[in-house]
Amino acid sequence: MLLLTLIGCSSLGPTVIPRDRVDYLSSVADSWKEQTLLNVVRLRYGDAPTFLDVSSVVSSYAVQGQLSAGGVINSNLTNVAPWNTATFGAGLAYQDRPTISYTPLGGDKFTKSLLRPIPPAGIFQLIQAGYPADFVLQVTVRSLNGVSNHGSMGGVVQQSDPGFYPLLDALRRLQLAGTVSLRLEKRGAEDVGILVLAASRTPQENRDLKFVMDTLHLRPGMDGQITVAFGAVQRSDTELAVLSRSMLEILIELASGIDVPAEHVAERRTVPSARLASAENPRERPLVRILSGPAAPPDAFSAIRYRNTWYWINDGDFASKRIFTMLMIFFSLAETGVTPQVPALTIPVN
C-alpha cells in the first residue's frame, strides 16, 4: 500500500527538467562542435562536408509499481502436521525512453546554408551589436569596395591588398569611438542596410574617418549615410559593396590553416597549409589553430578522429575558441530567409 501511494502521489516530470535541460544542452553543444570540426578537417582532405541537425528531443519517462500477495491453507485435518504458506511480492519498474529526431542537411537548405553568402546587413548588425569590426570583417568578407582580404580560392592563396588590414584597424577604432552605426530600411521585399558614419570628435577619429573614406572611395551625403549592398564593385560613391563569404568559404579558410601531418602532404593526401602559424602578420596566421597528432589531449576544447589521426583545438587557445564558437552565429546569418524543415514526430500515448 505504501508503494502504491508513493507512485500515485509523486510527479516525476518537474524533478527531471533541471537535469535534462542541462545534460541535453551540453550534449547538443559538444556534438555540434565535433561535427563542425570534423567537416573542417574533411574539407582539408578534399572530402565532402555533411551535416546532421538535432531537430527535436522528447524525453519520456515511465514508472510502474506492482504489489502481489498470496497464500495457501491446508484444510486436510487428518494430517498430523497441518501447514500453511503465504507469499508477498513487490516490484518497481523505471523506463527512460528519449526520442531524438535528426534532420540531414540537404537539398535547398544545404545549398542556402553553405553556398549562400552571408547578408552584408547581418554582418554590420553584428558590428552594431558590439562584436569587433576587424574580427567580424576579416572572417566574413572577401572584399570591401574592391579592397581584397587575404584568402585561398581553389588552393591558390590570394594576398590581401595593402590597405585592407589598416582599414580593419581604422574601422575598429571608429567602432570603439561610437562613430559607426547601422539601421535597416524596408525597400520592397528586402531590408537594406544604411551605414551612418557620425561626425568625429578627435584628430585621430578624423584621420581614421578620412582614411576609411579614401580607401573605400566613399563620399557620403550631408547626412553621412552609406548604402550597404552585396557585390564586388560599388555603383556609386555612396555605396559600400560588400563581397561576403559563404559558410563553405569560411570553413575552407579554417581548413587551410590546419596543422596536418607532414607525411599526409608528402603522400598528396592534402595540400600544404595556406595559413602558417609562423606568419609575420598575425592576421595571416590560421583563423582557428587546429592541431593534429596520434592522440588528442584529454582537456581539448573539441577533438575528433579522422582516418587514424586526431585533430583538436586547445582549450587554452581563446582566440581560436572565439572564432570557432562564432561559426554558429555565422550559420544563423547564412540561413536568413530559409524556412526550417520541421520533422513530423509521432509520440505514443500510454
Image (tube, helix red, strand yellow):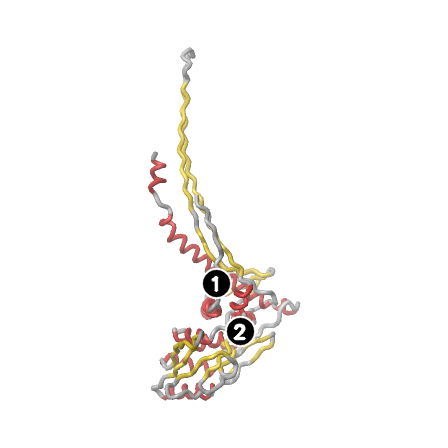
Q: Which numbered dot is residue 277? A: 2
Within 10 Å of the Cα at label 2, are there few (<14), some (14-19), or many (20+) other Cα atoms?
some
Q: Which residue is mark 1?
A: 340
- Residue type, numbered disc 1: Pro
* Amino acid identity at mark 2: Ala
Residue 255 lies in what quarter of the image? bottom right
In-image side of 266 versus 76 (left or right): right
Q: Which residue occupies the foreground of this view, 136 or 7? A: 7
Quadrant in which the C terminus appears: top left
Residue 292 image label:
none
Left or right: where does residue 300 sit relative to residue 4?
Answer: right
Dot 1 or dot 2: first in sequence order is 2
Q: Name the foreground residue: 199 vs 276.
A: 199
Viewer-proximal residue, 348 or 305?
Answer: 348
Q: Dot 1: what SS?
A: loop
**For residue 81, above or below residue 175:** above
Res 323 visible? no
- Residue 172: percent from the left, percent from the top? 41, 79
Which residue is situated farthest in the front direction here? Answer: 188
- Where, by quadrant of the figure, is residue 80 drawn? top left
Q: Viewer-proximal residue, 140 or 186? A: 186
Image quadrant occupied by the N terminus: top left
Instruction: Return the x and y of residue 57 as percentages of the image width and height.
Output: 45, 54
Callout 1 crowding tier (Cα within 10 Å): few <14, some 14–19, many ≥20: few
Mark 2: secondary structure:
loop
